[in-house]
Amino acid sequence: MHNITMKFGGTSVGTSEAIDNAVSIVQQSLNAGHRVAVVVSAMSGVTDMLLKSVRAAVAGDKWGYLTLSDEIRQKHLDVVHDLIAPGERREALLTALGQLLQQHADLCEAINILGEATPRISDAVVSFGERLSARLVAAVLQERGVNAQAYDATQFIITGSNFQSAEPITDITEKRIQEQLKPLLAQGVTPVLTGFIGATIDGVVTTLGRGGSDFSAAIFAAYLDSAELIIWTDVDGVMTTDPRLDKRARVLPYVSYTEVGELAFYGAKVLHPKTVQPIINKNIPLRVCNTFNPSHPGTLIGAESRPNDHIIKAVTAIRSVSMLTVSGKGMLGVPGLAGRTFLATARAGASILMISQSSSEQSFCYTVTDDKALAVKAAVEDELVAEINRQDVDSVEVSRDIAIVTVVGAGMRHRPGVAGRVFTTLGDSGVNVLAIAQGSSECSISFVVAEPDLEQAVRCLHDLALKNSVPQPA
Ligand code: ADP
Ligand code: ASP
Ligand code: MG
């Protein structure tokens, strides 16, 4: 008997049919004798609708947020009517869902009156997506005879107060999960936990960032000492590239924690970038599987580095990025300029996706997300004002409409030919490379290209990955 943590993403709980599949998957695992902790996302589209309701409320559009609230209600009611027979359970569930939706409308009303929404209140509003879906899925499990119970992760995942991207406080979270959740599993309860959300030590709701339910599930898996974490999603596993960018994408049977970390960081939406953090030290195997094709083995993710003969395993891309270039003749040999620039960038609330410096030391460039670019430029110009006045630094330039394309594969380590080959491939396809950087783990290389070149860049590199045509060492 094992204890297993399973997470179902938005599409996997997005319709009655999907929830029906998800529940069967849980039941099968229980029938095989395992104890299962279930983590759920909001029904697909609901998080976006909730964020839209915040914007409507800020704009004073009462009709807008009440309409959204109704649409969200209807989405859940459709499932209740399809999967839960009339009776006490259905009534209790309808009451619970109704209360949550009322709280949502009340919060929108408060935002409407104030005319503004802080990140804190926005987190409170979006938390309803997971709180609704957890109750719904738990009720469907109960309907099938499973001893399931819904829990808000706010009582277990304790975070700092960096709303919209909160960091869990590991020791308190570990203690809460070990002391309050683990015994429930041992008693035979199947907990259905909200993904994505946590709370500060004072009980204020936070979220872990978009797509954060994967991260939540990994936290639960780690502190419940699960034998396995299974992320159930809407594709057969981690693929050689985003199937929406290239239909030829194939499922990778195995990738390492490090490889998947790079893939996720550089844009593979299939997993949240922080997913492997909690499980890596405990060496908990992670499997990515398809709720709609459960007999497919999916992708296994573990500690071992298993380079396959495809030196490039996968290609990913991030859109909507800006590149900042700091340049000047007087920068040569001046210590500390880069450090100060990056600190100023952090103060502007941006994190850096990749950095590249030319060997002449007369310029370096780095990338941040578009929405932060202008604030970062202002912060860096402010920091370097003395250098700019002395003309040691000529300019801090922002190029927008940039994308980062990354190739990933542990087999690239110690293979000097790979970067060159990749570079040539891009050149042959007419893609102009604006900057290049190798990840510190040496299992990824990232390129900055103009956004209109993104698809072509991904396709030609994906060709290379599929063809296995990178030269092997003698
Ligand atoms: P969930 O709601 O289950 O969390 P997401 O939409 O967040 O699902 O992630 C799954 C999606 O990620 C897939 O439908 C696919 O379009 C996209 N994706 C992007 N890159 C990859 C990749 N390398 N492998 C698999 N899926 C990918
Ligand atoms: N529901 C959240 C989102 O859409 C979290 C998740 O699905 O992982 O971002
Ligand atoms: Mg996701």
Image (cartoon, rainbow, N blue to C red):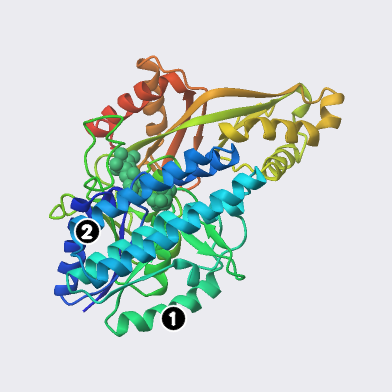
**At 22% from the left edge and 58% from the top edge, which residue is drawn?**
22
Disc 1 marks a residue whose amino acid type is Gln
**At 65% from the left edge and 42% from the top edge, which residue is drawn?**
115
Disc 2 marks a residue whose amino acid type is Ala
User: Residue 346: image x %, image y %?
Assistant: 67, 44
Q: In this view, does 416 lie above or below 432?
A: below
Placement of the C terminus among the 4 image quadrants: top left
Where disc 1 sits, the SS reads helix
Asked if disc 1 is less than 8 Å from ligand 2, the answer is no
* Number of other residues with Cα within 10 Å of mark 2, as a class: few under 14, some 14 to 19, many 20 or more: many
Q: Can residue 69 be seen in this view?
A: yes
Placement of the N terminus among the 4 image quadrants: bottom left
- Disc ID at residue 180: 1
In this rendering, would 383 be left or right of 253? right
**At 31% from the left edge and 30% from the top edge, which residue is drawn?**
245
Q: Mark 2 points at which residue?
A: 22
Q: Is residue 324 above or below residue 196?
A: above
Label tally: 2
User: Residue 424: image x %, image y %?
Assistant: 38, 21
**Viewer-nearest residue: 150 or 160:** 150
User: Residue 48: image x %, image y %?
Assistant: 43, 43
Where disc 2 sits, the SS reads helix
